[in-house]
Amino acid sequence: MKRSHTILIPEMLPIHFEFIHQALEDEGYQIEMLHNRGPQIIHTGLRYIHNDICYPALLVLGQFIDALQSGKYDIDKTALLFIQTGGGCRASNYIHLYRKGLQNAGFGNVPIIGISVNGFEKNPGFKLSIDIIRKCGCGLVYGDLLMLLQHQIRPYEAVKGETDARVQAWIKKIRQMMHRGKGLTLAWLKKLNREIVKDFERIPCVARERTKVGVVGEIYMKYAPLGNNDLVLFLEGNECECMVPGIMAYALYCVNMMIERIHIYGGNRLVAAVVGILLWHMGRMEQTIIDAVAGTKFTAPSSFRQIRELTNGVIDYGVTMGEGWMLPGEILDLSELGYPNIVCTQPFGCMPNHIVGRGVMSKVCERDPRVNAVAVDYDPGAARVNQENRIKLMLATARSNA
Amino acid sequence: MGISKRSLRAGLDIGSTTIKMAVTDAGGRMISSMYERHYGLVREKAVQFLQFLQKEYRGQDVAIAVSGSAGMGLAEKLSFPFVQEVHATRVAANQLSETVDVAIELGGEDAKIIFFGGHPDARMNGTCAGGTGAFIDQMASLLHMTPEEMNKAAKEKNRIYTIASRCGVFAKSDIQPLLNQGARKSDLSASIFQAVVNQTVAGLAQGRAIKGNVLYLGGPLTFLSELRKAFDETLGVSGICPENSLYFVAMGTASCATEATDLSEAIKRLSDNTLQPAFHALPPLFQNEEEYEAFQSRHSLAKITQKSFEECNNHFFLGVDAGSTTIKFALVNQYGELIDSKYEQNNGNPVKKAQSYLQELYRRYPGINIYGGCATGYGEELIKNAFKFDYGIVETVAHFISARRFDPNVDFILDIGGQDMKCMKIQNGAIDNIYLNEACSSGCGSFLQSFASALDYPVDEFSKKGLLAKKPVDLGSRCTVFMNSSVKQAQKDGAGIDDISAGLSISIVKNAIYKVIRPGGLGGLGKHIVVQGGTFYNDAVLRALELELGVHVTRPDIAGLMGAYGAALYACEQYDETQETAGVISRDEVNSFACEVSTTRCNKCTNACSLTINTFSDGRKYVSGNRCEKAGSGRHGGDKQNLYAYKRKRVEHLGVLKGHKDTIGIPLGLNMYELLPFWATFFHKLEIDVVLPPISNRETYLKGQDSIPSDTVCYPAKLMHGHVQALIDKGVKNIFYPCMSYHMEDKRGDNCFNCPVVAYYPEVLNANMSAITDINFIHGFIGLHKKRHLPKRLWRLLNPIFERITLPQVKAAANAAYSAYAEYNRNVRQEAKKILRKAKHHKTPVILLAGRPYHIDPEINHGIDQLAMQLGASVISEDSIKIREQSEITLGIFNQWSFHNRLYEAAHYAATHDNIYFVQLVSFGCGCDAITTDECREILEAKGKMYCQIKIDEIENLGAARIRLRSMLAAAGEHKGARSGEESEKAKRKTHFYERDEAQPYYPNP
């Protein structure tokens, strides 16, 4: 597959995926990130997947088929790749639904690769090498930091567009380093992260009054601009500064889940110990971001451990489907960090969100009365004006609270 | 340019249906106000309002701010400050003299609750929630009343019916049958108001108590005193509707205005028509007039042969199709030629319409001989009984019979009526598969009508406007509530009425194709497609369908009458030449016919169904509303062949108290239905009595509805709030409801997960039910799939409350519980075997009602099992099927949920056995079923069997389910006949009667 196929990947995190792109490319794969947008994606998705399926699945399939139909790719030499989560929610079924959809659309022969933490899918012709994993791991750290800084500076930048330009420059630089096999150790992460922060500190800023908003929610809706209708840009256009918790915390949550499971239901202690070591190492990677930002004018994110601590007593750690206990945890954490105004993005009818989103919101507010949250549903039929109106209500409350 | 103290402020509140303006003086008093419906012409109305300001307050500075969902775009365009409407309400309420605790505001399309005291909070309805002004308007037009008349009528209420108010479509399916059964309008009006109250409380309060000083705001609450009363009674408060309650938002908005505005500049900018439309446009329906004319002449070919009364030899048959909003009549001769027909609104009283039609027939054609009558549609039973018709057939069959007349090779029928959508696939001369629209996805004819009237157009004119629209709006294919906001958005983006009209027609078609039929690719529908139903008189819809499918279809000129015509043909087919007597009520009987309607509650069993009794003038009675045969007849079919009843009985039996000192309550819902045999034994061994809440009913739901945090979660989950509340009301001090990510390990699927809602709902109850803090709510995590680890975990959960319990005791109890659970499952399977044997012996059909454990709850299944029994079928459940050779089933999905794994096995069993009909019960909002339904369908269709799905929610009425089950059984019967190749006696006779035209197609397909 390496030589013969071009692998298409739907975009979710615009910055982070640049590094994943690099990691796969260095391994010899031909990669293309899908940036196609527009209403025809929703239409295509609706046509080939059950209407009541989660919106993210519909968008990703829509994006795949739309790309394949565009005529830009040689169908016999194209493969698809996406990253899926597992567990008891519908997401573990995405690959099967995509296969069915592709079959119905006449692309039954296009191979599709599902990468998941648990590795429950066999993907002939595609192998996750140690190099890919290392590069992706570090890429997530760099991505988290760049995203954090971008969100904290862009609303205040004196020259419009400077922040984004700086982000792009760093993406380019880090990709080049990765290509040369550099920047992939803990020491490198520490060093480079500090450099990045210093560089961003130099961007001239203007004091502007901004409402601080945290964005949480279902993983795809939270990050993907295609899914949430450019939520961050919308908020910034409405005089807000955003904080979107990084993906490292989510990765830690997924790994931690394995230990939690053994704790509750019993199982091999040795496995728990090994996973514990992995968790510790990932924690050290995450810590490089915190250390680099702490003490500067920027707000440093909290560690996974801190978020977990905050959640104690609000919801059981056994709740692990979807975003699980992590979602209320992130809300409480954002409020602690000074972002008590929350947009909780969720696909319409998302099952885990009935529990961890709306379900425990009252408990979260009870714990931290500063929290001012709005849950926004996204689906193929929801009109943007309604979503925006609800967010504006949250903002009006935020401003009258201030 | 700041604003001086003496200048005026104006607030514009542009909602989804109305535009309001309040002008306040420097002291914040309102000095003038305006209120108008805008019918989508937001810009034009805004200009009028601004011109009024300019004229009235010439020379004074006016500061303007805008609010409301439809005002956002306007504010952007004029750079006026935009104030979110809930925020505006809050500002205005804070200016009132008395302190306000809660404000409830109902608007055109939204509902809001604002909490002031303590932790201030504001809630708006979600994207999928009705119970608003538009909902009341929609219901009013259904009752042929104005909202004000409803208010007046509601004062005379006798009783309240249960009406779902989640959205208009749901409510309609509750109200329409009530109307058809003759329920009083005063009771219905009051019930509708009550439904709005329930919706607001359940959807918005989300666990927070509404008490103290309550403020009622917005149009509906201002104008409808009975609605306010319903709120008062439900909430136990006496709320106030302040002066200027209509202009509350506008006043709050006004006081947020800061800068004086240049009015003439604003008017100029608004009147500027060169606004670039920014909405997503679809290709037009017709490129030009010529194309439309060609289309018209092509369709004018599908014509039925009409004969006058005099041309025939007085041998007639009558068909009546009593639909949900209309009633249709067709009179044919023995050759199936049409003599007379009528199509009219039933105005909620189909019996009266049918009577006057019959009278008209007898008057117009003295001496007419009607040899047979057949009724179909929602009101089939009522009409058949009232007028002594010989036959009643299910409407799908009627439609098929008539479609065959227009195209003998028909292989697909698409029928879009006012309320429902039916699609039938025909194979080998019999109905092969049926698709009906779900209660939530109806984008049907009445939908177009309500949009037309909302925009102030007659429906004909409205749809004609769309034919030559240049840029039809892309509105997607979702339910009506979503469509409302999409239309709003399109208007905001500058779409014209014609573009919206065309867009709506296209979206109806897309709804039918992608939501109801969902063919994998479009080739699968068929080559000979006949479309029918009143909606297809609309050329725009017809054209949109042809464009979407890429084929030409047949639209009979009697598209709206096809049900009635088919029924008449059926009566004709059934006619036996030896028959002497007339097949319908005689002339004298018709003239003296009268019908009295009364309502009562059946007290023959615990269901306590509300009955509607029609008493005819000759003393005959027709009873409806009953779930079982007990009502009226006194006859009882028995529960012997009903596995659902068996399981219910088993579970109820487990709630018998044994007299132990310690007690523990278990809410009877979700997975507990299946696990009760386990837990009952477990606690019994530990000498703890298990207390169960009463079997659920509507009251159970209402008891807990105010603490439901997510209004889109499935109904079975919502019921859990009521169950826990019921237990607390019983005085139970300990409630046991553990979280379980996994179900029992059964080594059958890829994993044994529970769905997220089943797994974690105890967390939701714990977080949202305030009453829970006073008791021990044991909701920790346990894993039944790990037998070895479980006792320790359970002991840790229980020991703090029951200190006497030791770990060895828990171990022993758990072992006993596992055996009891296994035995229960064995018993269920044995019982199923018995039922299957007996059904085979008597050659009666078996319906495999495949759901999940909680679907045996009578409040969740609404008595579908009993309905199936009424139709003469036996009922078994999904968990009674265990297939030995699991490897035979190949699945295209990841099979990880225990409860769903059984569905696939059951589907496979039904697919490979004769006389077993697979009916899947699906709860609205169940995410897993988006996966399971397609998979089950594929399993069945691969073996050439029919798949049938019934979506259930709060809706009480089983009308749609009845049609579906009957059609399935009828189609299955016909299908069998067709497959075996035998030609029945009746089929032979059929040809005898049709010999004149030899089943010539009236319209050859291109």
Image (cartoon, coloured by chain):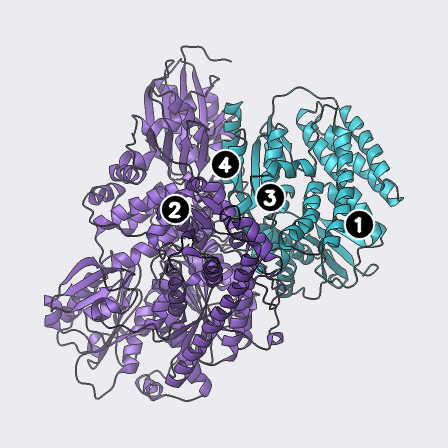
- Upstream in the sequence, badge 1 or badge 3? 1
**Residue linked to disc 2:** B728
Identify the element where label 4 is drawn.
helix
Q: Nearer the viewer, mark 1 or mark 4?
A: 1
Q: CA distance from mark 1 to mark 3?
A: 26 Å
Q: CA distance from mark 1 to mark 4?
A: 40 Å
What x and y, as percent, mark residue B971? 41, 76
What x and y, as percent, mark residue A207? 66, 19
Q: Are marks 1 and 4 in contact (CB under 8 Å)?
A: no
Could you tell whether B857 is left or right of B176 in the image?
A: right
A264 above or below A158?
below
Q: Nearer the viewer, residue B24 or A351?
A: A351
What x and y, as percent, mark residue A155? 66, 27
Mark 3 belongs to which amino acid? Trp
Q: Are marks 4 and 3 in contact (CB under 8 Å)?
A: no
**Residue linked to disc 4:** A390
